[in-house]
């Protein structure tokens, strides 16, 4: 009989865990809960660590020096070394994973879930504000700089948009591009004299290039661009529809019309990529063998006090019993996602597992999250590295450093030891811990070890 694996969470880690367990022959139930941190997704996958240069004590940044200053800080080996010096208790260390194994797992899992992202080679990409960011993986509608080349930077002439010329010049300076190879153009937009919701163009262009709005937009872009320089890349704001599929279709269509690669920049403030990711996650869970139950877990049944035997989930006003349960994978995030309590004692919310700080159990009986903040905004706030402890199979640890329950696992940002906003590994942690937890929960990792030479 197939094992029943329950995944709690609605982000990338939950999707990877669900599909990995399904691939191993399990029956899977997903309870999405809150997906709060998905709103932070800007179209890039962070895997191998931060840029080597830092501003302040630990905040990663890119140098504004031309050319070499940026490209010198994309090398994964350098970034991994820098990361593990800063975070010796990082989940990569807990799982005893090196760079090559991380790369292999991430690429394999992204392919297995047919993710709309491409992994590697590491490089840089432009944001809508003109800043350059290090990327290991990227939404397929966006552009990773392969080499400095002429840019046609299209902006929207609305009251709340970034100025095209200033943003283009800033980015060109960071990659060492001569000013003569930069063209900045503001596209007109209906009602351009008043601020528009940043998501408004997404709705207008969501019908695709063959719609009336799509044809009008295409002609506006073609007229504005004219005859681009040889080998130029045309960069648009991240506005090409509400889904990754529509954005990719738009890029293909405009590339064919203009005879030059057309890509989107990464958003800074717009919710574009987050909306697309939410849509894709919902679709990716609609496969045979995965049951999606949109409710909150209220209670658990126990087997000998050592295993979770069943769960009760409240959907609306109705309780649903899930059982028997063979394993539970927590991919519930930290404070925003609801995985950790926000009031003393700071513990994992559902099963009371302790939180870890710098690899050690934190006594939080009287500790509030605000007591673990730094003095300055740019400090490396200890509270942001809190999370549950794990062993090499991603079991959730108790206070004695042993698995709290034999069939309770963790994946993603719930795991302590990493600062997702600074470390440059948020997607990598999601992918490798979700895969590890699901394989351990289904016994697939034991099967792999038995078959290994």
Image (cartoon, grey):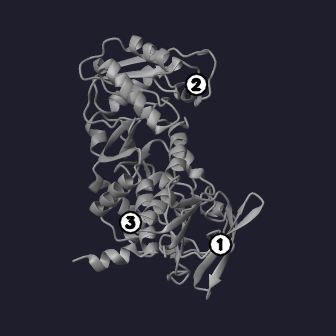
Q: Are marks 3 and 2 in contact (CB under 8 Å)?
A: no
Q: Residue at x 46, y 31 (%)?
A: 128
For label 1, the residue is: 311
Q: Are marks 3 and 1 in contact (CB under 8 Å)?
A: no
For label 3, the residue is: 92
The one nearer the camera, 198 or 277, is 277
| Element assignment for label 1 | strand
| Element assignment for label 2 | loop
8 versus 184 height, above or below: below
From mark 1 to mark 2, how far is it between C-alphas?
47 Å
Label 2 neighbour load within 10 Å: few <14, some 14-19, many 20+: some
Earlier-in-chain disc, 3 versus 1:
3
Label 1 neighbour load within 10 Å: few <14, some 14-19, many 20+: many
Q: Is residue 151 left or right of residue 311?
A: left
Q: Is residue 333 visible?
A: no
Q: Is residue 344 left or right of residue 68?
A: right
Earlier-in-chain disc, 1 versus 2:
2
Q: Residue at x 52, y 25 (%)?
A: 205
Query: What x and y, as percent, mark residue 328?
Result: 55, 71
Q: Residue at x 76, y 62 (%)?
A: 318
347 versus 130 height, above or below: below
In the rendered image, the residue lying farthest to the left is: 453
Q: Is residue 195 left or right of residue 407?
A: right
In which quarter of the view is residue 91 placed? bottom left
In which quarter of the view is residue 260 placed? top left
């Amino acid at each position: 009989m197939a094992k029943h694996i329950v995944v709690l969470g609605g982000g990338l880690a939950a999707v990877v865990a669900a599909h990995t367990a399904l691939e191993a022959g399990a029956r899977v139930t997903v309870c999405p809960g809150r997906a709060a941190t998905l709103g932070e997704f800007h179209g890039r996958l962070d895997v191998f660590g931060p840029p080597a240069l830092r501003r302040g004590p630990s905040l990663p940044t890119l140098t504004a020096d031309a050319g070499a200053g940026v490209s010198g800080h994309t090398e994964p080996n350098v970034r991994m070394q820098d990361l593990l010096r800063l975070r010796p208790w990082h989940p990569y260390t807990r799982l005893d994973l090196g760079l090559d194994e991380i790369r292999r797992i991430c690429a394999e899992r992204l392919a297995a879930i047919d993710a709309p992202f491409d992994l590697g080679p590491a490089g840089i990409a432009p944001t809508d504000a003109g800043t350059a960011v290090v990327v290991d993986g990227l939404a397929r509608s966006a552009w990773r700089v392969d080499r400095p080349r002429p840019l046609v930077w299209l902006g929207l002439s609305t009251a709340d948009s970034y100025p095209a010329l200033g943003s283009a010049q800033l980015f060109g300076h960071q990659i060492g591009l001569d000013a003569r190879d930069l063209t900045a153009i503001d596209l007109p937009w209906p009602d351009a004299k008043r601020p528009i919701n940043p998501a408004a163009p997404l709705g207008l262009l969501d019908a695709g290039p063959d719609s009336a709005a799509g044809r009008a937009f295409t002609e506006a872009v073609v007229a504005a661009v004219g005859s681009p320089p040889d080998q130029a890349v045309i960069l648009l704001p991240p506005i090409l529809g509400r889904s990754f599929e529509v954005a990719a279709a738009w890029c293909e269509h405009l590339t064919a019309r203009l005879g030059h690669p057309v890509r989107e920049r990464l958003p800074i403030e717009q919710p574009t990529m987050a909306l697309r990711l939410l849509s894709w996650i919902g679709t990716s869970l609609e496969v045979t063998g995965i049951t999606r139950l949109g409710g909150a877990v209220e209670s658990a049944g126990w087997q000998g006090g050592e295993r979770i035997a069943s769960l009760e989930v409240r959907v609306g006003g109705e309780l649903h019993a899930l059982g028997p349960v063979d394993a539970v994978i927590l991919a519930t995030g930290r404070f925003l996602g609801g995985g950790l309590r926000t009031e003393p004692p700071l513990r994992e919310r559902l099963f009371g597992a302790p939180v870890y700080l710098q690899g050690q159990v934190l006594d939080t009986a009287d500790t509030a999250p605000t007591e673990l903040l730094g003095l300055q905004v740019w400090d490396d706030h200890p509270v942001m590295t809190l999370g549950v402890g794990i062993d090499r199979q991603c079991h959730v640890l108790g206070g004695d450093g042993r698995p709290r329950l034999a069939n309770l696992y963790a994946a993603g940002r719930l795991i302590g030891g990493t600062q997702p906003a600074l470390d440059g590994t948020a997607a990598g942690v999601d992918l490798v811990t979700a895969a590890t937890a699901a394989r351990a929960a289904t016994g697939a990792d034991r099967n792999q070890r038995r078959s290994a030479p």
